[in-house]
Image (cartoon, rainbow, N blue to C red):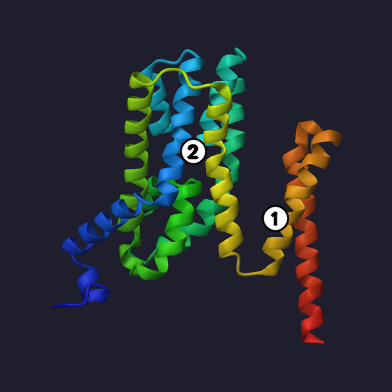
Amino acid sequence: MSDPLSPKASGTRSGAWRWFGRGAGAAFSIPGLILASAFVGFAGLAKEAGLTVVQTVFMVGVVWALPAKVVLVGAILSHASLPAAAFAVSLSSVRLMPMVVAIVPEMRTPKTRKWVLYALSHFVAVTSWVLALDRFRHVPRDMRTAFYAGLGGTLVLANMAVVTIVYIAAGRLPPAASAALLLLTPMYFLTSLWGSARERASHVAMVLGLALGPVFHLLVPEIDLLAAGVVGGVAAYAWHVIAARRRRT
């Protein structure tokens, strides 16, 4: 029997489908369950905002990233204009660009078509990004696009089903419960980043960001997250440079 990790085996069509299936299986995990819980909260939020089930499910498939959908629902509730809502959603999604830049080189090979990478970029969000980067070291490079297609596609379809079921079958969730469920994903993201960080500077940046966030919320609430991220990131980078120089001396 040939080794499924060998280049010869991984390059076959059956190998691609096998890795697609493994990616789909990876979606059914603790992180995937946390994400589904967050979408339970989103279904309640969308129903409260007056969206139909079709509109809500369509939003899950097209927008995908949960914070962007929450921003869009907020824009709908505030009766914002279409250009203003589009700008707010686009601005919230800019944060995904560094994640795309980080994950695409891990999937790209000399034979990978650009449109495949463009299509797979749609699946980039917190859960799929963390799961993929954690498991890519066990996936042959030429099979990573198939693996990620299975992972990302399954997460999207599964949560479209979750939102449909919750919207139709469940009653209205209390606002506090919806907010708590929506917070599960960023809490998972934070703990995953902490555990997978390779440099101490990453821990410093996260601690500074958590500490500075409330401070800047009081001082400059309009740009509190941006200010906390920039100041904390620059300070962590400076700490990293100073520590590296001390190790060399």
Instruction: Report whether 10 appears left or right of 216.
Output: left
Residue at point 42% right, 58% down? 132
Image x and y of residue 204, in percent: 73, 61
- Crowding at mark 2 (Cα within 10 Å: few <14, some 14-19, many 20+): many
**Residue 63 in view:** no
Q: Amino acid at mark 1?
A: Met
Q: Quadrant of the N terminus?
A: bottom left
Image x and y of residue 13, in percent: 18, 61
Instruction: Report whether 126 appears left or right of 249.
Output: left
79 vs 179: above or below:
above
Quarter of the image where one finds residue 17: bottom left
Residue at point 59% right, 41% down? 94
Q: Indicate which disc residue 45 carries.
A: none
Give the labeled residue for mark 1. 206
Quarter of the image where one finds residue 10: bottom left
Tag 1's secondary structure? Answer: helix
